[in-house]
Structure formats: structure tokens, C-alpha cells
Image: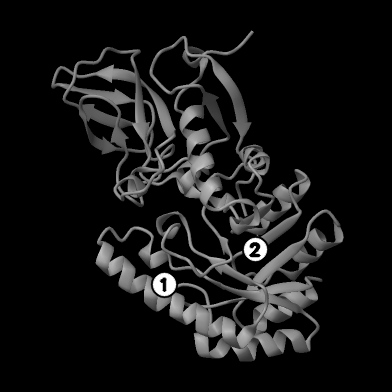
Amino acid sequence: MTMKVGEINTPALLVDSNVFTENISHMSAARPGASLRPHVKAFKSSYLAKELVAAGHENFCCATIREMEGMAAAGLGKDLLLANQTLNSERLKKLIDGGSARVTVAVDSEETIQAAKIGGVSEVLIDVDVGMPRCGCHPNEAGELAEKARAVGLNVRGVMGYEGHLMHQKDQQKRDMGMARSIKKLETAHAEVGGEVISGGGTGTWESNNLVTELQAGSYVLMDTEYARQDLPFQQGLFLLTTVISVSGRGHAVLDGGLKALAMDSGPPSLVGKGEIMYCADEHTGITGNSWKVGNRVLLRPAHIDPTISKHEVMHLVEKVSETDDSPVIDTWPIDLRGW
């Protein structure tokens, strides 16, 4: 018998299948096949990733070795990029020796080059700092690093650069100016490095980054309130289903999902329907501005899906998300790529 929403223990993640399908279709039309390298860090599920394979995207981007291992084990290792630095040669070697994945690793130093070499990796991208204060070498150092990588026998496929500092920039003029600077840096580095791959970008710059040969977008599949503040053609499809467990005479209600079910780095969740969020505590969220009864179901939209999803073990796919208890659950996807 098909499970219904009313039978789901809360707090729980729900995915709106209609929104999910529309988001995938829109991005696939603009970035078909290998021109999109979906970033699995956004959704942490090889089961969801298989839906992207069905849409024509077989190459994936990962943030952790755990994600790489899980994708390979799921038969999704055609072309995996670890878009992050690692010194864990032992785990890289185990992944390579498994023989079920083509592995490319981002490098930005002699140390990470050596780690890749010792780990048995044969292909790398030179990671370039294009403006976000995170990983990546200076654009002027990219050519020299590429030479050092080739000198130890590595195939340098190209360059990578992530303009993460611009992903949530709502001011169009500032975003355009920032993009021009970032693209110039990556273009300059690529001219020195060579290779067929220019990898980078994300959901927030999906349309304005016209340099990359493969876009590393991931959040677009489900979206969150942080991205929803921008004028993007993707809709929010991920929700946290909660239950009212207490109603106060002072005019507020308490939900059974809080900080342990929601990431707060981008702010509090938004409430679906009338009312507002008062606070989020460890196991509770306080809401006010409406009339609720104990046992009512309440939906929240996470502000940042990546770390929110990583707090859960599964997400439930439904045709259309609502608090209605008799809505059928189409599928349940394990969130199997959590951890490090």
C-alpha cells in the first residue's frame, strides 16, 4: 500500500515532484548533457542524482570523498570531479583502485598535486581563486602549477574557478561587474594552463557565466529561500514537514522541528501559509500569527538546502507538497552521501 503524507514521522523532508521536474527541465534545456556538471553537495543523494542522469547529465561534481565513494558505488562514476582540495591519498587510492569511477581532482598547490599523484589519480584541474576567499591558486600561478602537475605525470584537463561570492548578489550591476572580473581571471589562467575543461559557476550565476564549458550548479534542483530572493527561473521544491506539538495561551504554537532539522547559516526558514517564525531552538520552532491546534501539520521552507538535507536520512517525493495528510508519497530517496 502506498504511504501517505499523514503517515510520515516528523520532522521530515518533502520534495515537490512537479517543481523538481520543472527545475530540471529548465536547466537541461539551457545546459544540456555535459555542459552541466551537477553538484551533488546540494542534495547528497545518489537516488536523486539518477534522476539527473535520466535528464542527460552523467558527469557530476562532488565536495567530499564520501560523495565520490557513494556515487561510484551507485554506478554513477562515469566522470566525477572532486571540486575540493584533499590530502587524503589513502582514500583516493582506494577509490581509484575500485575501478568504478573516472576521477578528477582539483589542485591548487604542490602538496595537493603530490596527494593526487600518491593516491593514483591521473587527472586534475587547476583550481583558481577568482574572487571568493576560499581555495584556489592566484591566476598568475596557474600555469606554473599545471607544469608541476604534468611533470609528475598528471593529465591537466583544464581549470576550475568558483565565483561563490557572487551567487547571492542581488544587485545586477554589482553582479555583472563581479562576473566580468571573475571570468577574466579564469580566462587568463586557462590561457596559461590549457586543456579542454573550464569548470565553475553555480545556480546563482547559471545564466551569466558564459565562459565555463561545464556549469557546477546543484541547488537549482530544489532551491531554497536564499536563492528565492533572486530573480531565478527555478522554484522552491524542498520543504520541512513538521507537527504542532504545543499551543500556548500566549498566542504561539510550537513545532517539532528546529535547529537539528534545519540549517540556519542563511537565516531562519520561512513559514508556508499565514503566520511568522518566532525562533528556532534545538528541537523546536516557535510560530505565531495564526490559529493552530495540536496535531496540525505545518510546512517550512529551508533557507539553505545543502546543510539542511545533510541533517536527514531520507526525503519523500510527493506529487504536490501540502499539509494534506492523504497526499500519496511517490518515492522515498535515501540521503546516502552524507558524511566525510
Q: Position of residue 57 (x, y in %)?
A: 65, 49
Q: Quadrant of the C terminus?
A: bottom right
Q: Residue at x 69, y 50 (%)?
A: 58
- CA neighbours of label 1 inside 10 A, class few (<14), some (14 to 19), many (20+): some
- Quarter of the figure with residue 250: top left
Give the labeled residue for mark 1.
Answer: 132
Q: Earlier in the sequence, mark 1 or mark 2?
A: 2
- Mark 1–mark 2 distance (CA, rounded to whole Å): 18 Å
Pick whichever, 161 or 196, lies toward us: 196
> Of the residues shown, which amino acid type is indicated by label 2?
Leu
Q: Position of residue 133 (x, y in %)?
A: 42, 74
- Please state if 268 lies on the left or on the right of 73 as rendered: left
Q: Position of residue 236 (x, y in %)?
A: 40, 37
Q: Residue at x 38, y 18 (%)?
A: 323
- CA neighbours of label 2 inside 10 A, class few (<14), some (14 to 19), many (20+): many
Element type at marker 2? Answer: strand
The mark found on residue 82 in the picture is: 2
Q: Position of residue 66 (x, y in %)?
A: 67, 53
- Please state if 73 lies on the left or on the right of 163 as rendered: right
- Quarter of the figure with residue 180: bottom left
Q: Residue at x 58, y 45 (%)?
A: 44
Q: Quadrant of the N terminus?
A: top right
Residue that extends furthest to the front in the rendered view of this protein: 29
Q: Residue at x 73, y 81 (%)?
A: 114
> Of the residues shown, which amino acid type is indicated by label 1?
Met
